[in-house]
Amino acid sequence: AQKVTQAQTEISVVEKEDVTLDCVYETRDTTYYLFWYKQPPSGELVFLIRRNSFDEQNEISGRYSWNFQKSTSSFNFTITASQVVDSAVYFCALSKGTYKYIFGTGTRLKVLA
Amino acid sequence: DGGITQSPKYLFRKEGQNVTLSCEQNLNHDAMYWYRQDPGQGLRLIYYSQIVNDFQKGDIAEGYSVSREKKESFPLTVTSAQKNPTAFYLCASSVGSAGEETQYFGPGTRLLVL
């Protein structure tokens, strides 16, 4: 069975703190893709990153970084020096092929000024 | 500007009424999707379409219907058979082959039952 678990339901941090959002996945496939999306209060899901199962290099984009570890089936997302605009619900997703994604239940991040 | 549009932003349904949610994209994407999001939950796939005139049921298709007559459009009808339709509905489209595609989302439609 394929599954994505985001155990952190809600996280609150003070502005400028670093925060890590956890994502653990389960799949028997050797080829798969992992994603992170941001859902601000407006509701639209914004694509942040896609990672394939053969590329375990960490990625950094500005204040965002992602750590992919196949050994622990995790794809964690870190925001450095958080800002109020980072407040949103963040979803991790797994592509199971045939156009279907498995989404986690999301982590609500609140960044307090 | 390229993107995905959904209308209306809010929609109210009366008991026994069918309602249709619009989704249009000008990204030239082949595949389109409909998801349902309930409070505090992740997204669940209702229907998806890989090409024009073809669509597949997702995990929660009962009470919903779709059509794909044009590449740009993928309307979703919530029928009276859907007993609990109150939710946030998101449309998406994607580029890339199966398993390698990246889905991009529209702004969503919030459906409320009167």
Image: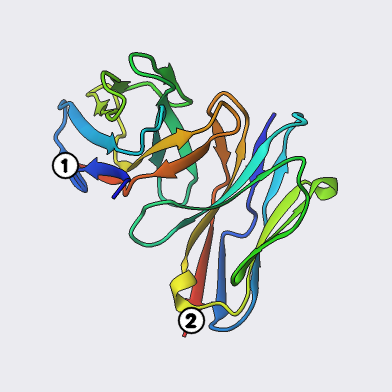
Amino acid on which the number 1 mark rests in the picture: Phe
Q: Is residue A107 left or right of residue B112?
A: right
Q: Position of residue A68 (x, y in %)?
A: 75, 53
Q: Is residue B51 left or right of residue A60?
A: left
Density class for disc 1 (Cα within 10 Å; few <14, some 14-19, many ≥20) is few
Position of residue B56 relative to residue B93, above or below, is above
Of the residues tagged 1 and 2, which is closer to the observer?
2
Position of residue A57 relative to residue B82, above or below, is below
Tell me how far mark 1 sits from mark 2, CA to CA: 34 Å
Residue at image mark 1: B12
Q: Given the current orientation, which residue lies at the most extreme right position?
A: A71
Q: Chain of mark 1?
A: B
Q: Given the current orientation, which residue lies at the most extreme top position?
A: B53
| Residue under the point 30% across and 26% down | B82
Q: Chain of mark 2?
A: A
Report if the CB atoms under discs 1 and 2 are less than 8 Å apart: no
Q: Is residue A61 at least partly visible in the picture?
A: yes
As helix, strand or loop, the secondary structure at mark 2 comes to strand
| Label at residue A36 | none
| Residue under the point 27% across and 36% down | B23
Q: Nearer the viewer, residue A110 or A57?
A: A57
Q: How many marks?
A: 2
Amino acid on which the number 2 mark rests in the picture: Leu
Position of residue A8 relative to residue B3, above or below, is below
Q: Position of residue A4 (x, y in %)?
A: 64, 43
Residue at image mark 2: A112
